[in-house]
Amino acid sequence: MPSEPQLEVLVLGPLAVRLDGVAVAVDRPLERALLVRLALAGGLPVPDQRLAVDLWGDVDLARPTERLRVLASRLRAALGTPDILTRASNGYALSARMTDLVSARSLTKALYAAARAGDHATVSALGREATALWRGASLADLRTIPYAATEAEQLDAWRLDLQVERLDAELALGGATEAGRELEALAAEHPVHERLWCLLALALYRTGRQADALNRLAVLRSRLAGELDVEPAATTAEMELRLLRQDPGLLLPQSAVLATPPADPELPLPMTTFVGRGRELAELVHRLDLPGVITLTGRPGSGKSRLALEATRVVASAGRAVRVVHLASLRQADAVRAAIAGDGAASNNLDEAVAGLGNELLLLDNADQLTGPVARLIPELLRRAPKLTILVTSQQPLELAAEQPQPIEPLDAIAAAQLFTERCAADAQGADPGLVAAICTAVDRLPLGIELAAGLTRTVSVPQLAERLATGSQTAVPAPRSTTASRPTGLVAVLDWSHELLNDAERAVLRRVADFTDGFTLEAAEQVAVDPRDVAPALTELADRGLLTVEAVGGRRFRMLETVRSHVLAEPRR
């Protein structure tokens, strides 16, 4: 007897629907709204009158039962499985699983249990895993529906609560600098959230910025009075007083600071949001708990390195030691051992390479040029350090018997559109979803291609971009120089176009910094530039266009993805 079809309804972001793992399009807003409302009921029937109020508001509708019958019929047709949506005597019921909500609830329960136990590292790790389930604003495409607007606000408030709990834990772990950056951004989005602003003030105080901390609370006090006509809560007033008195209790005890794992200088903080890989991130973090070797594989521009970096940050936040080795700049086999061993070690001394690794997580990023040497070295490393976990990023698997490949596929349509929206120019964020989908499809929904395409909206409109990517207009998109399987034509098109839209000074700076194989600072770029005065504005423009990434690691550090570097180095020198 065939099993009953499994319907998944995902609401932590724009609505996504899957039937037996395959995406299902439910195009009309009211049918999507009915689907979500019934899914939220957990399989119980929802009476017609309740449904009518939730979908259309508290208005006097003519023949609500008939309207609902038409909606239900259309929804069954869209799902292609009539038995999933049933009619009971007192309403409609839907057999569906809200997998993202179930996962988020489970993680939240564990997070608050860890918080009560004072286990800050676990709170941090669970908080990151839980918030990664959100693909953007909850029910972003249904907020004109009465019940959905309220539900979406509650779901987004839940996400914010999880973020605040995580950041509170990371402050307790000694991470005031990193937590402060996130708190600053969140405080700008939530101008009267008192706990958030108090944590921001605490983070600033712990980094030696007492005046800034007091200023933030003064701003909060002013906004509460002006916008809500209320006084700050007692806890906020107490925080302000303790800051003024420089209360020693605001600083972490020295024992807590010493117990906190030192920040890895090679574990940078990306300056952009991580979008669309919540499920892959959660799966990867879970797999990294065990020793062995995991290889993230995928096409150029698929986001392997970014996913690996996010996973290492989650692992490090839980107190586990992490070592990051960038292989992109290496060409000799012996250089891999030397890079793992670190400065001052003999390049062929494997004992030095594994000394102190223990149960660390070792990330070997961009192994494409050295797959043979890496594949030969890994079994030796695991024999000498059996508790070691090795994470590798490569376009192809290493073909090791113990290897666990994790292929990284293109983003799904929903995540791709979200990434484009987050990276595009401000005036392009309300663009036609159909055009955005066409642009993302043209670049094979690869994160790098989407970010480059989004960067082009600083110069051209979304309709122009969609049309010219679709038609390959030679006036807008130069003919790709390579259509090899390793580099998709759509990605080449946006790389070519991004390059053509730069001015001469920006192209010159881009070509010069392409010689840096392991990232660079502003000062380093100025040293190699024809005119150092061009560098700062050029780097800003290149980052805005997605041609460079920016990381917070001892200041600002710029990095060029290997796909972009290969393209730039193929250009004739200017």
Image (cartoon, helix red, strand yellow):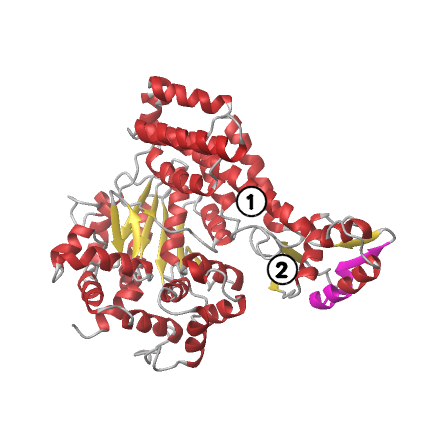
Q: Nearer the viewer, residue 363 or 355?
A: 363
**Residue plotted at (77% across, 65% down):** 73
Seen in the image, is 469 located left or right of residue 568? right
SS category of the residue bearing label 2: strand
Is residue 22 part of the magenta span, yes or no?
Answer: no
Residue bearing the label numbered 2 = 17
Asked if the residue at tag 1 contacts the one at tag 2, i.e. Cβ–Cβ closer than 8 Å, the answer is no
Q: Quadrant of residue 561?
A: bottom left
**Can you say whether 64 is above or below 256 in the image?**
below
Q: Amino acid at mark 2?
A: Val
SS category of the residue bearing label 1: helix
Range drawn in magenta = 73-88
What is the x, y in percent for residue 495? 32, 70
What is the x, y in percent for residue 249? 37, 18
What is the x, y in percent for residue 499? 28, 70
Q: Which mark is residue 156?
A: 1
Q: Quadrant of the N terminus?
A: bottom right
Is residue 76 part of the magenta span, yes or no?
Answer: yes
Seen in the image, is 146 located left or right of residue 180? right
Seen in the image, is 397 located left or right of residue 16? left
